[in-house]
Image (cartoon, rainbow, N blue to C red):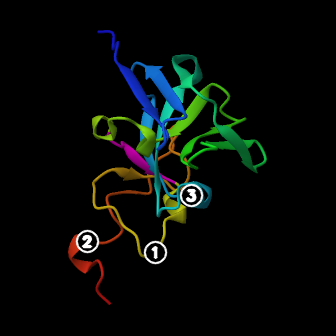
């Protein structure tokens, strides 16, 4: 069965708008330091899309080269982070989940870069956690949180 849905999103002020066709390739919570810094949060939920199914429909984001081969985009008007792209994955764009018009429609499937997860932050779900990326047959380091929910916040 063909999935003909169209997903839309954009920045806070509306200067940047985008859309993509079909389902995302993947959705993951990323704990890496650069994603955390770009979205100013303990983690960034990211939506992977094939570049051929993605297009900007209004405006073009500014680009910041955050590390060799990695570009992060944002709205020059309101500062909203939009996406990141990497030379090692030339056929993909990774959108920040918070820019979706309906973020409730796409759920995360995994945690990536869990090796960089902040020690005081935990998400209590049963999703697989990968030390780095979760591609190419990599095995998760665990499923679910590092500790039980009743121990969070206790010293």
Report if the CB atoms under discs 2 and 3 are less than 8 Å apart: no
User: Which residue is denoted by mark 1 in the rendering?
Assistant: 119
Give the label on residue 11, or none: none
Most foreground residue, 125 or 20: 20
Q: Residue at left 56%, top 52%?
A: 132
The C terminus: image quadrant: bottom left
Q: Which residues are magenta?
A: 107-112
In which quadrant of the rendered view does residue 99 lie? top left
In which quadrant of the rendered view does residue 74 lie? top right
Closer to the chain start, of discs 2 and 1, is 1
The answer to whether 149 is drawn above or below residue 14 in the figure is below
Mark 2 Cα-neighbour bin, 10 Å: few <14, some 14–19, many ≥20: few
Total label count? 3
Most foreground residue, 115 or 139: 115
User: Which residue is denoted by mark 3 in the rendering?
Assistant: 32
User: Which residue is denoted by mark 2 in the rendering?
Assistant: 148
Query: Which element is circle 2 on?
Result: loop
* Left-right relation of 80 to 4: right
Where is residue 100 drawn, in percent x and y?
A: 40, 37
Q: Residue at left 68%, top 40%?
A: 62
Closer to the chain start, of discs 3 and 1, is 3
In which quadrant of the rendered view does residue 154 lie? bottom left
Query: Which element is circle 3 on?
Result: loop
Between the residue at mark 3 and the residue at mark 1, the CA separation in whole angstroms equals 13 Å
The N terminus: image quadrant: top left
Q: Nearer the viewer, mark 2 or mark 1?
A: 1
Between the residue at mark 2 and the residue at mark 1, the CA separation in whole angstroms equals 14 Å
Where is residue 109 drawn, in percent x and y?
A: 36, 42
């Amino acid at each position: 069965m063909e999935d003909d849905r169209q997903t839309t999103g954009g920045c806070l002020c509306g200067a940047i708008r985008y859309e993509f066709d079909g389902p995302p390739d993947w959705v993951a919570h990323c704990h890496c330091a650069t994603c955390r810094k770009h979205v100013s949060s303990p983690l960034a939920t990211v939506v992977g899309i094939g570049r051929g199914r993605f297009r900007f429909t209004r405006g073009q984001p500014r680009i910041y080269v955050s590390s060799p081969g990695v570009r992060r985009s944002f709205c020059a008007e309101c500062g909203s982070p939009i996406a990141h792209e990497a030379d090692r994955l030339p056929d993909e764009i990774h959108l920040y989940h918070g820019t979706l018009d309906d973020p409730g429609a796409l759920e995360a499937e995994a945690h990536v870069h869990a090796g960089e997860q902040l020690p005081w932050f935990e998400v209590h779900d049963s999703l697989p956690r990968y030390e780095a990326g979760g591609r190419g047959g990599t095995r998760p380091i665990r499923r679910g949180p590092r500790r039980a929910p009743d121990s969070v916040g206790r010293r």
